[in-house]
Amino acid sequence: MSYLYATGRIRVREMQLLSASTVERMIGAPNAQEAYRALSETDYASLLEKYPNPQSVEDLVMRHLRDIRYELQKMVGTRGPLNIVWRRYDFHNLRVVIKSRVKNLSSAEVKKDLEKNWPAAEQLD
C-alpha cells in the first residue's frame, strides 16, 4: 500500500473522529438515550443497528476501535510500527491467559476478559 494512500485514508478517518460539539451534546444530554442518539450523526452510525441500546455503548466503541485497528494494520502490515502502540494490550491479554490457567477458568470467561480491554483484530466477526 502506498504512503500517499495510507496518509489520505488516515486523514479521512481523522475527520470522522467525534467533534467537541458532539461530545458536549452527549455530556449535556438529559438521559442516556439522547446521548446515544447523538452518535447517529457520526461515524458510529453504521454500528448503531448492531448495538441498539445505550447500555451497549462500550461494546459499540470497542467494535469501532477493532475495525480501525484492523484497517490500520492492513495499511502498514502486521509487523509495522503500530505494533508498539498495541503492545500494552498484548501484555493485558497475556496476563488474562496466565490468570485463566492458574484459576482454571472456562474459555468463555477467558474470552470475556480478553474482550474487555481490547480484542485482537484477528477476532473480528
Image (cartoon, grey):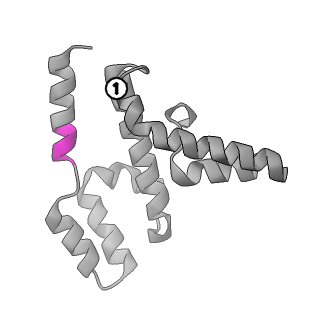
- Residue 38 sits in which quadrant? bottom left
Magenta stretch prevailing secondary structure: helix
Please give the residue where the numbered disc 1 appears in the rendered image.
81
Q: Name the residue located 42 percent from the left edge and 19 percent from the top edge.
A: 79
**Figure quadrant of residue 6:** top left
Q: Position of residue 30 (x, y in %)?
A: 30, 85
Q: Residue at x 20, y 73 (%)?
A: 24
Element class at badge 1: loop
Say whether residue 96 is left or right of residue 20: right
Q: Is residue 15 magenta?
A: yes
Q: Is residue 61 left or right of residue 75?
A: right
The magenta span reads: 12-16
The spot of residue 125 in percent (x, y) is 55, 37
Image check: 10 left or right of 49?
left
Q: Residue at x 37, y 23 (%)?
A: 74
On the question of residue 67 being in view, the answer is yes
Name the residue at 54% across, 31% down.
122
Residue nearest the viewer, comparing 14 with 34: 14
Q: Is residue 117 left or right of residue 4?
A: right
Q: Nearer the viewer, residue 86 or 71?
A: 86
- Which residue appears farthest toward the top when viewing the image? 2
Residue 18: in magenta span: no
Observer able to see residue 51:
no
The x and y percentages for residue 113 are 64, 53
Mark 1: amino acid: Pro
Q: Residues within 10 Å of mark 1 (few under 14, many from 20)?
A: few
